[in-house]
Amino acid sequence: MNIKFGSPGPLVHTGLVDADVVVIGAGALGLSTALHCALAGRSVTVVERHTAGSQASGRAAGLFKSVQADELRTGLARRSIEKAASFADWAGVPLEVARPGSFLIARTAQHREYLRRELAQSVRWGADVREASPAQLAGGLSYYRAAGGEFALWCPEDAYIDEPASLVRAYLDACKLHGAAVLENEPAVGISLTDGRVAGVETAGRPIAARAVVDAAGGWVRQVAELAGARVPVAPVRHQLLITAPVPEVDPADPIARVVDAAVYLRPARGGLMLGGFEAGPLPLDPRQQPDSFSTDDVPLDLGVLREMAGQVGAEVPVAGSAPVAEHRGGLFTMSPDGRFVAGPVPEVPGLWVASGCNGSGFSSSPALGEALAAWITTGAAPPGMTALAPGRFGPLPDDELVTRGLWQYAHYYDPMAPERV
Ligand SMILES: Cc1cc2nc3c(=O)[nH]c(=O)nc-3n(C[C@H](O)[C@H](O)[C@H](O)COP(=O)(O)OP(=O)(O)OC[C@H]3O[C@@H](n4cnc5c(N)ncnc54)[C@H](O)[C@@H]3O)c2cc1C
């Protein structure tokens, strides 16, 4: 269902922050959608329960990955890299992006085959991905001691943003520049409907009239949708990473490495090494079953999970297990049953839109996903391929199946077509 501006019903302005579009949630997905709506000439207000970027987005590893499991996600990922790298040109504020490229590494026969398939399809979908020679891998990563039997891909387009707060800051500055209001410490507590259609948002402090409301509440996206009687098909799942103290073994200019059979990622960070990964037995965590005050600070972290991952790459990356841990952080992914974003109009509530189903890539895909969603909201026409991400695509799905499928997607983040993990 496409909701166009100019659709029936006058917008009754009741206060200074009334807007064409109200976005609930000032994480990467909400801020990008807001910014792109503002760039399209719409009045935009963002309401944020805490402070902008304080939840998942401010804790991300900051990795951008050009190799994705389907053509749509490959296109969004590559467009996002391009937009992040040229942020100042289109958004008007600077953003620093490290572009050292990445290695995708397989140490088992099965994952070798898997990467070969990814290579063929990614090239077909336009990504610049090449087979890396053993010498290139051995000489290309100071923190990785190649065993010699690996199969590796070189992905020169891949990038990272060192401190995730800098993308949030850039979105905020760009929102301000282009006239979008961001109201922090202002939780949405209601979504008002007129004749079944969205009419605005109630915050703890005031009503805000709007023709379109975007639910971009991250791990809280289901609670927020429920305010309008809608259901968003995602399961929040814990994700964590660590950063070691500065160590001489890591060259700050090193590329990113992803060891796909161990589902571990690594990159230089603050003079040390960042390690994160996807455990085979992930922890689902539904904020709807937590106290109202629940925030990302309350997500239970378990360093043991990361130590186990460090052990899985211990022979190749000894520093991951031996260096002191300087930071351990985590938060929630919103996993969908098919591993794809959940973005578009909510079928049962005209005027309500969703920007979610990050599946662990919401930070890096936010530039292109926000752009596409804003185009859909402001023109009423879905950009090519985007209907595949529509929130209604799963039909009624019981919660236990939603969680089971979301957990599977999480555990198979790097190998959604490969059945086994080491
Ligand atoms: C440790 C970690 C590492 C990660 N690494 C990467 C990575 O390398 N690359 C990548 O692409 N992604 C990564 N991710 C995933 C990425 O962080 C998420 O996909 C992305 O941040 C999701 O953005 P969001 O805007 O949906 O959610 P959030 O950033 O969580 O924003 C949602 C916002 O909604 C607000 N909110 C909730 N309820 C309400 C309400 N009622 N009213 C108003 N506001 C409300 C919240 O306070 C929050 O600020 C990582 C995540 C974690 C936890």
Image: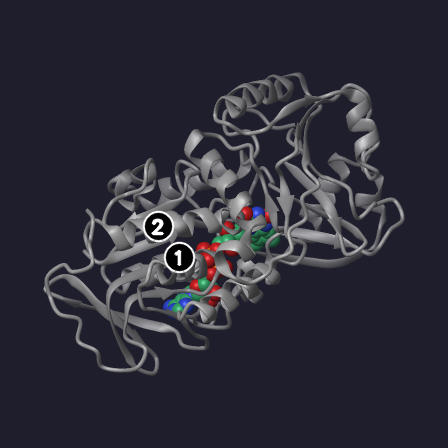
| Crowd class of label 1 (few under 14; some 14 to 19; many from 20; radius 10 Å) | many
Is residue 237 among what the camera can see?
A: no
Query: What kind of residue is marked 1?
Result: His
Using the image as rendered, state which of residue 378 and residue 336 is in the foreground.
378
Q: Position of residue 242 (x, y in %)?
A: 71, 52
Query: What kind of residue is marked 2?
Result: Leu
In the image, residue 265 above or below residue 86: above
Q: Which residue is mark 1?
A: 36
What residue appears at the point 76 percent right and 35 percent down from the top-left corner? 313
Q: CA distance from mark 1 to mark 2?
A: 8 Å
State the mark number for residue 342.
none
What residue appears at the point 59 percent right and 28 percent down from the top-left corner? 128
Contact between marks 1 and 2 (CB within 8 A): the answer is yes
The answer to whether the residue bearing label 2 lies less than 8 angstroms from the nearest atom of ligand 1 is: no
Which quadrant: the C terminus?
A: top right
Mark 2 secondary-structure assignment = helix
State the mark number for residue 373.
2
Q: Is residue 221 left or right of residue 246?
A: left
In the image, residue 89 above or below residue 21: above
Residue 292's quadrant in the figure? bottom left
| In this view, the mark in front (1 or 2) | 1
